[in-house]
Image (tube, rainbow, N blue to C red):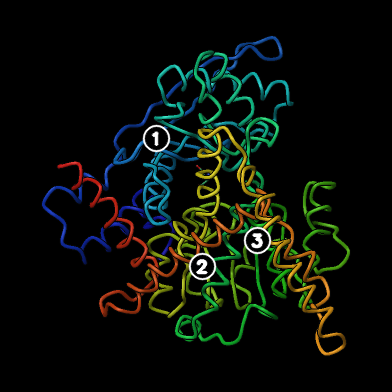
Amino acid sequence: MNRASEPSFRESVDLMFNRAVALMDLPPGLEEKIRVCNATYTVRFGVRLRGEMRTFTGYRSVHSEHMEPVKGGIRYAPSVNQDEVEALAALMTYKCALVEAPFGGSKGGLCIDPRQYDEHELEQITRRFAYELAKRDLINPSQNVPAPDMGTGEREMAWIADQYARMNTTDINARACVTGKPLNAGGISGRVEATGRGVQFALREFFRDSRDMAQAGLTGSLDGKRVIVQGLGNVGFHAAKFLSEEDGALIVGVIERDGALVNDEGLDVEAVHQWIVKHGGVSGFPDATFVENGAVVLEEDCDILIPAALEGVINLDNAERIKAPLIIEAANGPVTAGADDILRKKGTVIIPDMYANAGGVTVSYFEWVKNLSHIRFGRMQRRQEEARHQLVIDELQRLDDYLGDAWSMSPNFKDKYLRGADELELVRSGLDDTMRISYQSMREVWHSRADVTDLRTAAYLVSIDKVAASYRAKGL
Ligand code: GLU
């Protein structure tokens, strides 16, 4: 077996889709309608930089418009190509359906190494790309709403939002044209951490069910579980940080571009992150063993493997050697279709990308709703909630006084109970609810159907069913 026989990313997604639809009873033709990508727009534009005209190639692919707007990030990477953008757009369709975010699927990409350009140059390039897309309604609050992805973040989203607003000066909903914006440009609290937070909530839900743990040969809780994370970017960093700081997991390995860090006692994720920001890589970090060929650390012994970087990192070359009994796909498409077959036969449990990294688009949905309603979550009810809580506290206080030493309120109870939820708490609560409910919908299919032996197939079944229902409702 070798990489030559490995299908492309888009073929991988299609193969996984086909495996699932073979177990469904869809009307003739609908299967193909759902699988194919509706349209991919390619744009080549020039920007005058450093005294010369430079040409850039960008894409925006729309996979399914069964619901509009369509949604999905914009990626900046030199490796961006049409096949990748189409695969990612398809995953967005299934992801949004699974977590019930009312969007179709889309994705964008620009072939660029953002590290080669300074901030001003990136702004010029981003604004020009946004102009090209907005001109064709490929950025539009009611039709197509981009978001951050690899190589982009809040800063790029703010430029895109501003560019759209300049081109649509009377659109009162202009801010809803893109999500993942900074708070002061119409963003929402908790969007930056959202995908990593979603990975944490997904794992918590997995560890709530002994049947799921048994499938992976695991017991107990997240506390003390040994975790290896590949990629300490926005998603990997937040997932690793929350799992280690809040759930007691040990991050025993971190794989980055320049190599990997290993420490059986558990790494200080925040310190590793600071080191990367300062030195551009993990090499030289004092409290760990450095492994130059980082990829081999994917094959190390651990309880949970979190690929949070590129697609295709677990493939026909290394799948057989992967020891982790549980893989959670924080990245999009980190396991190829061939590797998926091998791992499934080995009994490895994979929490699939379309669910595992859906935290980002879920909170994007909240941001879009916030922008359209023009009001911050919690603004109307927070103080009223506090006033009602005060009534309960007053009554409890009377009881406390009356009972003397026999009973008193627990320390901190007053403060904790009194405080009404702010936007961040509401966002986290909405995300937790979404991750739990969508996991439960996969779990139900996984455990109730003898022909479904893995979570990925279960995820496809749930989401394709929802997409099909929406086509049927339209009479298509
Ligand atoms: N780029 C992220 C993803 O792949 C977020 C998409 C969004 O928020 O629309 O899911």
Callout 1: CB less than 8 Å from ligand 1 = no
Label 1 or label 2, whichever comes before in sequence order: 1
Residue drawn at the location 34% of the way across and 79% of the way down: 447
Residue matched to label 2: 318
> Considering only order in the chain, which callout, 2 or 3, is on the residue closer to the N terminus?
3
261 vs 220, left or right, is right
* Percent of width and height locating residue 328: 53, 66
Label 3: which residue?
239
Q: What amino acid does circle 3 point to? A: Ala
- Which secondary structure, mark 3? helix
Q: How crowded is mark 3: few (under 14 residues within 10 Å), some or many (20 or more)?
A: many
Residue that mark 1 sits on: 69
State the mark number for residue 2: none
Q: Could one spot residue 229 in this view of the protein? A: yes
Pick the front one: 77 or 429: 429
Amino acid at pointer 2: Asn
Front tag of 3 and 2: 3
